Image: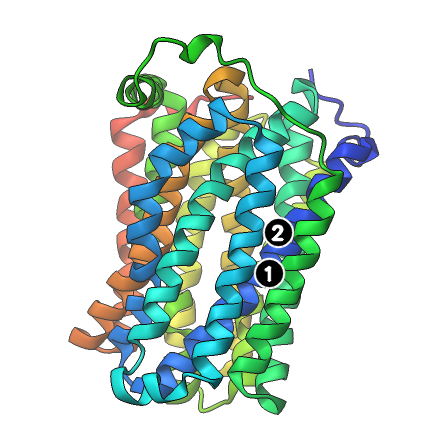
Amino acid sequence: MANHSDAFASLRISNFRSFLSTKVLTSLAILMQQTVIGWQVYELTGDKLSLGLIGLSEAVPFIVTTFYSGYASDKFNRKYLLLIFTFLLACGMGLLSWVSYDAAPLLKQYGALPLYVILALNGISRAFLAPLNLAIQARIVPKFLYANAATWSSNTFYLGAIVGPIAAGLLLEVFAPWVVYSIISGVLILSFLVSFLVPSQSVDKAHLEGESFIGAVSKGIKFVFKTEAIVSAISLDLFAVLFGGVAALLPAFCKDILFVGPAELGVLKTALFAGSAVMGIAMAYYPPTINAGRNLLASVALFGVSIIGFALSGNFYLSYFFLFMAGVFDNVSVIIRATIMQVFTPDDMRGRVGAVNSIFIKSSNEIGDFESGAVARLIGLVPAVIFGGIMTLIVVGVTNKLAPSLKKLKL
């Protein structure tokens, strides 16, 4: 049984603090990059679909690579993989800086294409880091602290997500994109150095001996789809965020609807994460796991309502408020889903199951960005976001009908 009386229980584990430190630095860097690349690409092209292509350029290599990355996480020392791919991600940010400065004529000749290519390379590094984070965390903390650890892991991500866009927006007011990318690369180098403090995590390879890569991956996929709690939770998240995500369209909203600049874009990008952080702190004291299934469905529905409110606001401060509320409800579903993943998954399959989960999340976020950009080009910004919010509500209703046991789930 979890210890609900100590909201800071998992933070008292030194190895967990080291792991969170590298995670928050990496999150900070990634969210800074997303803010810079969105503004830069929209400045280059003025095309809403080009914003959607940012997500797609990362999502395709991420999805293609993730099954092997999950397999590798279950076969090789997880700390070494963490070090390697954090360093490679730092190198990718360095390439973005180079293309934006020394190779700037490439951008004039080919538009945003060189940026998309580098983002695709970064997507491979992130494909390895995603299942690693789930697997490493589950080995560091005891099982009765999984929900508490998931809450603080979520909170530290949101810390980076709040600071990152604001910092990137302010830096873009003063410096060219290539300077900001260089700073981001430095943040990732720091994350790489902190990763040395994470305990070494060798894995038991006996369960993979004599088993092919395809066989091992298939076992992980089968486990996910036969475990109703896992497949219901991640499917709900996939389709809700696929339709309800608005992050990719924020640069266009700022320029064309709210008439504000990059600094305000950075602030607006933090709204979702600020709401998530506030709810995350509350959930450290009052975990949402007692009626987990019902809370999951309700939170996703209210997320959809908040997205519709954002679309209709037309005012910067109201827009911030509705995105803040969307973040509040989103974090409830994030923490419940993460707890479900850790409670129901055996240690020798965490990498592969984490890979499947990562594909669902990446599909919903980055492919959702592409969907948002494509629909916005077809029917306009505001109608596209309203459509997404309504579809989110429909997804909740369908999930409630097809997976009635989810509503009864308690953790």
Residue 395: where, in percent of width, then height?
Answer: 28, 44
The coloring applied to the image is: rainbow
Q: CA distance from mark 1 to mark 2?
A: 6 Å
Kindly indicate whether the residue at mark 2 contacts the one at mark 1 (C-beta within 8 angstroms).
yes
Q: Compared with residue 287, is residue 155 higher up or lower down, i.e. above or below?
A: below
Residue at 66% in and 58% down: 189
- Above or below for 218 versus 401: above
Query: What's the mark number on residue 161?
Result: 1
Secondary structure found at label 1:
helix
Question: Quadrant of the image for the N terminus?
Answer: top right
Residue that extends furthest to the left in the rendered view of this protein: 378
Does residue 61 appear left or right of residue 258 in this picture?
left
Relative vertical location of residue 41 with respect to residue 207 in this rendering, above or below: below
> Would residue 206 be found to the left or right of residue 149 on screen?
left
In the rendered view, tell whether residue 183 sits above or below residue 222.
Answer: below
Residue 214, x across and y down, in percent: 27, 22
Query: Badge 1: few (under 14), some or many (20 or more) residues near its Cα, within 10 Å?
Result: many
Q: Which residue is mark 2?
A: 157
Q: Which sits in the foreground, 54 or 264?
A: 54
Amino acid type of disc 2? Phe
Q: Residue at x 33, y 73 (%)?
A: 114
Q: Nearer the viewer, residue 1 or 107?
A: 107
**Image quarter of residue 264:** bottom right
13 horizontally vs 251: left or right: right
Neighbours of disc 2 within 10 Å: few (<14), some (14-19), many (20+): many
Q: Residue at x 44, y 74 (%)?
A: 37
What is the quadrant of residue 355 in the picture?
A: top left
> Which quarter of the rendered picture does the C terminus lie within?
top right
